[in-house]
Image (tube, rainbow, N blue to C red):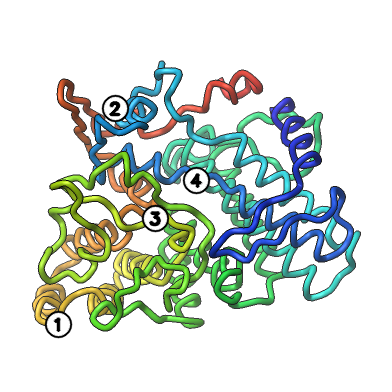
């Protein structure tokens, strides 16, 4: 890891500039060493803009996609699709590692220096708060890529990922335990929330963390840890600030669009493999294709197969939105035996996604459900609502790690239930630079 940090440090000093984006108001870094609030804002923008686009690669591992064997990128995706992690073809796309620590490096610099250099103001407090949240989210993503799913009984001894909390070229970057990483993630969220003072940014700047985005992240982290009362509280607080949903009965805008009324934060490119993959029969089959208004917005036919209409555009970058918060609220409420709120939250989302006749039928069905089938329906609705937005691999890990089968024209590949490959290996170049990862 020391070598990686040195590489990152050199990279930051040599390339402190990021280009403007069509849909995001990103300003270039104007100085090598930041001194003013504007300089630190630009440095943090560099961190946001360099956040890895790894969610498409995760989707390839799920039951959402079928790879196109004739696609240009097929050789680079095949071993991900077949979960051949031990000795993949050298052309295989690597899941990011150094890129995450580049983001953390920038965030650490902002946390350490922004108030020393630019003073303590509301502006620098917001910038520093965002840096804490970005560091928390980056460690959270690393943990869910390269460590086992959270298990309360074993988290204190299960191996996690290295924590990077300061710029120290001599630090020993050995993996911390899963519990230690989560403890730091929650501490960073708390530190960030105490500093943030902006509830929303104008469209184009809504790739930044806000008080709402901090609550959305907290709700997701608590959900992943199975801390249901805390997850429900965070989701409810965020929805109290803004509970709007895109009503697909009157709107044709994707809920994940950066201008959507339910948008919270648009930082990540969730999906950009439209030319390399088709939507799986499994995913297509979980929708009422005539009456679920998401279906024609999410998918389109191309050459006889369905492809995703999500992603492939900076306008469809998404990290957090209200649709997810309603589902967290529903799941958390059910797990704490508040079945009435679970039904209410689930139906509030369905009311904005289904044609009225189907919604009425769903309301009748759901209002008679007991706890166990209602939980299964919440899981199914997560799959429908959040399709190809980067959630499915993590949900499969949380919900029992089921068996998945993929195939091409000549081979069949099986990921067994509870397969060790539900945890992705550290990349070879990361191990080469940090033997602690072995």
Q: Are marks 3 and 1 in contact (CB under 8 Å)?
A: no
Disc number lying in front (2 or 3): 3
The residue lying at 74 percent from left, 59 percent from top is 42
Could you say whether the residue bearing mark 4 is in a helix, strand or loop? Answer: loop
First-in-chain label (2 vs 3): 2
Residue 111, position in %: x, y? 77, 55
Residue at disc 2, secondary structure? loop
Whether residues under marks 1 and 2 lie with C-beta atoms below 8 angstroms apart, the answer is no
Residue of label 2: 82
Which image quadrant for residue 123? bottom right
Which residue is most to the front? 303
Q: What element carries label 1?
A: helix
Q: In which quarter of the image is the C terminus?
A: top right
Relative to 364, is 255 above or below?
above
Q: Residue at x 80, y 32 (%)?
A: 169
Mark 3 neighbour density, 10 Å: few (under 14) some (14–19) many (20 or more): many
Q: How crowded is mark 2: few (under 14 residues within 10 Å), some or many (20 or more)?
A: many
Residue 162 point in image, percent of width and height? 63, 35
Query: Nearer the N terminus, badge 2 or badge 4?
Result: 4
Count neighbours of disc 1 (C-alpha within 10 A) and say few if under 14, some if 14 to 19, many if 20 or more: some
Q: Which of marks 3 and 1 is nearer the N terminus?
A: 3
* C-alpha span from label 1 to label 2: 41 Å
Q: In this view, does 277 lie to the left or right of 133?
A: left
Disc 4 packing (10 Å; few <14; some 14–19; many ≥20): some
- What residue is shown with label 3? 311
**Left or right: residue 237 compared with residue 162:** left
Q: In which quarter of the image is residue 359?
A: bottom left
Q: Earlier in the sequence, mark 1 or mark 2?
A: 2
Which secondary structure, mark 3? Answer: loop
- Measured from the top left, where is residue 20 in percent x and y? 64, 58
Q: Mark 1 points at which residue?
A: 356
């Amino acid at each position: 890891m020391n070598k990686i940090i040195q590489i990152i440090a050199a990279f930051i000093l040599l390339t402190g500039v990021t280009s403007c984006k069509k849909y995001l108001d990103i300003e270039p870094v104007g100085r090598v060493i930041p001194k003013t609030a504007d300089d630190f804002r630009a440095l943090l923008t560099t961190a946001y803009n360099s956040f890895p686009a790894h969610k498409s690669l995760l989707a390839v591992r799920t039951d959402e996609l079928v790879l196109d064997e004739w696609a240009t990128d097929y050789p680079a995706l095949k071993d991900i699709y077949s979960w051949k992690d031990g000795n993949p073809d050298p052309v295989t796309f690597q899941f990011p590692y150094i890129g995450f620590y580049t983001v953390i490096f920038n965030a650490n610099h902002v946390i350490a220096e922004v108030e020393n250099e630019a003073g303590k103001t509301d502006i620098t407090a917001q910038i520093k708060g965002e840096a804490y949240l970005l560091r928390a989210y980056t460690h959270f993503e690393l943990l869910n890529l390269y460590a086992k799913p959270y298990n309360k009984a074993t988290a204190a001894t299960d191996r996690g990922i290295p924590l990077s909390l300061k710029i120290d070229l001599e630090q020993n970057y050995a993996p911390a335990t899963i519990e230690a990483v989560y403890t730091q993630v929650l501490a960073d969220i708390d530190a960030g929330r105490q500093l943030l003072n902006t509830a929303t940014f104008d469209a184009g700047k809504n790739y930044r963390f806000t008080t709402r985005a901090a609550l959305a992240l907290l709700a997701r982290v608590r959900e992943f840890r199975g801390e249901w009362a805390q997850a429900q509280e965070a989701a409810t607080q965020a929805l109290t600030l803004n509970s709007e949903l895109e009503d697909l009965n009157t709107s044709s805008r994707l809920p994940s669009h950066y201008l959507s009324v339910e948008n919270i934060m648009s930082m990540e490119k969730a999906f950009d493999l439209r030319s390399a993959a088709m939507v799986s029969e499994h995913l297509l089959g979980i929708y009422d294709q005539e009456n679920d208004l998401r279906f024609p917005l999410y998918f389109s036919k191309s050459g006889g197969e369905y492809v995703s209409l999500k992603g492939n555009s900076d306008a469809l970058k998404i990290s957090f939105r209200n649709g997810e918060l309603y589902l967290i609220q529903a799941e958390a409420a059910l797990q704490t035996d508040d079945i009435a709120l679970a039904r209410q939250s689930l139906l509030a989302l369905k009311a904005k996604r289904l044609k009225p006749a189907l919604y009425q039928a769903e309301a009748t069905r759901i209002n008679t459900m007991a706890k166990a089938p209602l939980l299964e329906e919440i899981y199914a609705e997560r799959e429908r609502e959040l399709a190809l937005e980067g959630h499915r691999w993590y949900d499969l890990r949380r919900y029992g790690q089921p068996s998945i089968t993929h195939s091409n024209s000549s081979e069949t590949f099986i990921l067994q239930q509870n397969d060790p490959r539900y945890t992705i290996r550290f990349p070879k170049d990361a191990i080469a630079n940090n033997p602690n990862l072995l």
